[in-house]
Amino acid sequence: MKKKISFIVSTFAILGFLCACGTPATVTEEIPEIAPAAPESESAEPVEEGKTYNLALIIPDMVNPFWVYMKDGAEVVANQYGANIEALAPMKPYNVEDQIRIIEDLVQKQVDAIVLVAADSNGVIPGVEAANSANIPVVTSNTRVFGGEVVTFVGYDNVEAMYTVAKYGLEAINGEGKVILLEGTPGTQTGADRTKGMQKAVEEFPGVEVLASQNADFQRSTGMSVMENLLQRFDEIDAVICANDEIALGAIEAISAAGREGEMIVVGFDGNKDAYMAIAQGRIFATLDQNPWAQSGLGVENAIKYLNGEEIPDFVSVDYRLVTSENVIDVAKERFGITLIGQ
Amino acid sequence: MRFKKIIRTPGILFIIILILIIGSFISPHFLTLSNFSKILYQSAILLLIASGMTLVITLGEIDLSPGAVLSLSSMITALAMEKGSSVFLSIIVGLATGLICGVINALFIVKAKVPAFITTFGMMSMAKGVSLGLKDGATVRGLNENFTNTIGGNIGPIPVVVLISIFCFIILFVLLAHGKLGPYLFAIGTDKEAAEYSGINVQLYNALPFVITGLLAGVAGILFTARLNLGHPTGGIGYEFEAIAAVVVGGNPLEGGRSNMVDTLLGVFALSILKNSLTMLGYPIWWQMAISGLVLIFALLVPNILKYKLIRIRLGDKQ
Amino acid sequence: MVKDKGLVHLRKQNVKIIGLFKAGRFIFPLLLLIILAILQPSFLTMSNFVNILRQSSILFILAAGQTLVILTEGIDLSIGSIIGFTACMAGSLVINDGNNVIGIFLAIILGMLIGLINGYIISHIRVPAFVTTYGMQILIRGLTIAFMKGDVFWGFNDSFRFIGAGSIGAIPMPIIIGVLVLIIFYFLLNYSTFGQSIYYLGNNRNATKVSGFKIRKIETIVYAISGLVASIGGLLYLSRLNSAEASLGTGFEMDAIAAVVLGGTSFFGAEGKIENAIIGSITITLLKNAMNLLGISSYWQPFIIGLLIVVIIANERAFEKLRNLILVRERVN
């Protein structure tokens, strides 16, 4: 038996050696990474208080880089204020019930404030209400919550933002052609809002025909497999509009595997590092930089200010901007401290 | 029998006590009445599904569909309310959804002789597809306020969700421990052919656990809807595995033939306090996952090692 | 449940008829092919066939390992997480050091090690496979997320990409590796004592033990192989996706299990062949491809897959009943 296993192993070992021959090729050059750019809100001086606050940040998932950026941003700001922060996420990604459970547990733990990125704007309300009844302030960030009492909302309008970037993409194909929409995970607020934004943009151009609108789960792997099948199905595609950069990055992999690069433009959303590199390479057309660090950082800052008894506005706006091949180098440098060298 | 019982129970009790001790060290808020009532509230839905699953596992089978059926029932209940039907009718519709899914499972398993794993795997996929397709993946809002107030409310200090869950659990407990159901299921789980020869209506008793699990998934869907205050197309996914884990970690053998509802209750309780204490601990999600996985494996590993050691000592170590 | 599947000698003329019944599971994919060819001209292209084969070969590799496990009456729910873990480890080595060989080796060895741990706990300590591998699934996924901490390794060198995305001549690499796995598994199952002992083990555990097989060792190795091929499948997938993320491979175990059972391998062990996994994985890929080509909403797709799984197996069971009827009549004569 041992012979058999060693046979299998060695077979693949030989294969591995075969594959190892070849020269590595990279289009982009990267200087050593520095810490992510801190949010713009840094100007606030550390507040010395008699008590260190215990805060909690709840995000929908810890695999997608975007949410991890939010976690980093929250930690940076919390450190500046000398507050403790713990970042929690449901074990099942984007699970609202788990988020409610986490809030309930945090209420039992009696944290001072909760910064919440809801997986679903409505579904999480019972959790917010649980926090309200225990007098724990809740600051929402990135995703609005449609009920309960929240201190403030830090973020932007997902529908409008997706509309902006989708419209930019559609204008680039002169407002006519065949378009594919790749949506985010069903049952999540972000997903639903972005689909709405895409549709809003599409409706504005009568010349645009939507070939398909499919779910790609906010994931790179799903984005790739869905795109593979769509490429097989449609001979002519002019634009692919994706609900986030992960989907877009999967889609471009499928497109280049099919040898159809340059035939269509791919538009993403979020502004993660790989997407910037892809834009510099000319593989993704545009994305949206929405500054996740500031979203959570301002959330934490406002929570602390609220605990200190300061007045907080109902809505703290975080700016977003389009990222295209023109400004990608600057944005990437500002956000990630990396230098991209385009094609 | 007594010997077996003694070595079987400590596994889960040991874990519960361990979590309780560690938990009380981590946070002063862990060992409080209010925290435990919250844990009870959080585990209500899992308890429902796990109780049904116990019956299925007694047969030596597995039901993979309750998580998806839960979501479907949640969607249909919410949709019925959105369309303006009364609370009572919506609840009936939700229950019927679960029941129908259970009956379909049972028919395929008993009549068409499709293995339970495949049937329920298919049902899981089907229920998921329907609940996503009904509203293109969106959630359903606009529930009737009476619904939220009754099912989502309290009777005295106890949430209705908990009452319903415990009520169902007690019924199943009595059925399994004191009715005909228990011995029949044990017999079928041990040896189907022998059970048939001894005159048990094997088809009926093979079907019942799946029907009951379906119905309970329907009930769980309604409770889920009340808890979230909306119908969710994917919210229940994963519950089936958690339920199976709870049943088995509690000490019920996966190969069937023997089961105890109290063990299931302990299993559900252990998993729930584990989750609660991990959140209290505030560890990042990856350590939480790693610890959960380890606990699942060790819950059976340690007692099994002990058991084999003991048996070996008894038999004079022949291996 | 009677476990002994006794051999029945048949008369020659009826073997043919029974062979036809056994082909029941072939009929469905063929039917699907014909319907598609009529409805969608773009389906009948060479590139689409290659596409289907390429997609199904990765699924097949995973299903092959799962077949062994299911033949011993077990189940391996951890392969999705093993894929994620090993792929991320390999990805980090390839990206950071540019060292393909070590990355690939590490992935394969890690996959096998995790499988070995699974196997040891299942066979020696007798923790049910379902719980062990479910616990391992959560545990390994947690470790993967801890290792990645939100990072994504992206943009591998061309030689690494060759394994999954390249092709030799007109044949994509995944298909070549898939065929290799098929050949190895075919000989393993049909022409080795180890393969025989897997069937014995699935058929009757105690009898196998009594007849002198080291059942614990066999079972441990089976899970190790499952982990090993999972990591190979994961590497292919990684190379094709061109990026390693912590959620890679989530849910793949269910696809693999579906492919195995759809191919007709019995869930009660001992009944089934490696060829079944090919049929199963091609059917599933074909089905997904068909639904996409026909433009069926991705929300309704799980419904159709679930329905077909149940219907195909029910249909097969009906065929089996008929077959048994014929066998009985044959015996009476």
Image (spheres, rainbow, N blue to C red):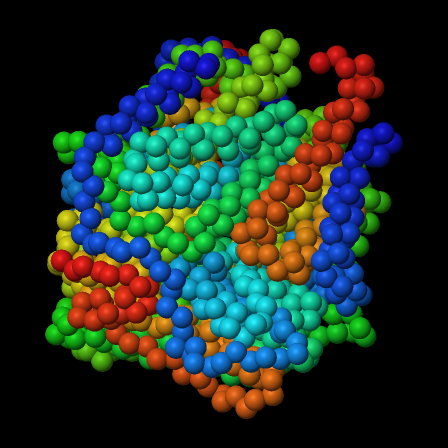
The correct choice, above or below, for A232 with respect to A273 in the image is above
Q: Is residue C138 visible?
A: yes
Left or right: residue C111 compared with residue C103: right
Residue shown at 41%/16% (left/top)? A4
Residue shown at 57%/84% (left/top)? A306
- State the image coordinates of residue B292 (x, y, percent, origin top left): 62, 48
Left or right: residue A128 compared with residue B205: left
- State the image coordinates of residue C87 (x, y, percent, origin top left): 38, 41
Left or right: residue A205 compared with residue A244: left
**On the rendered image, what quadrant is the N terminus of chain B found in?**
top right
Viewer-proximal residue, B37 or B75? B37
Residue shown at 54%/16% (left/top)? C200
The correct choice, above or below, for C210 with respect to A115 in the image is above
- State the image coordinates of residue A273 (x, y, percent, origin top left): 31, 60
The correct choice, above or below, for A104 with respect to B248 in the image is below
Viewer-proximal residue, B132 or C311? B132
Viewer-proximal residue, C176 or C160? C160
Q: Is residue A193 visible?
A: no
**On the rendered image, what quadrant is the C terminus of chain B found in?**
top right
- State the image coordinates of residue A139 (x, y, percent, origin top left): 54, 78
Count of marks overlaid on the render: 0
Residue shown at 18%/59% (left/top)? A341
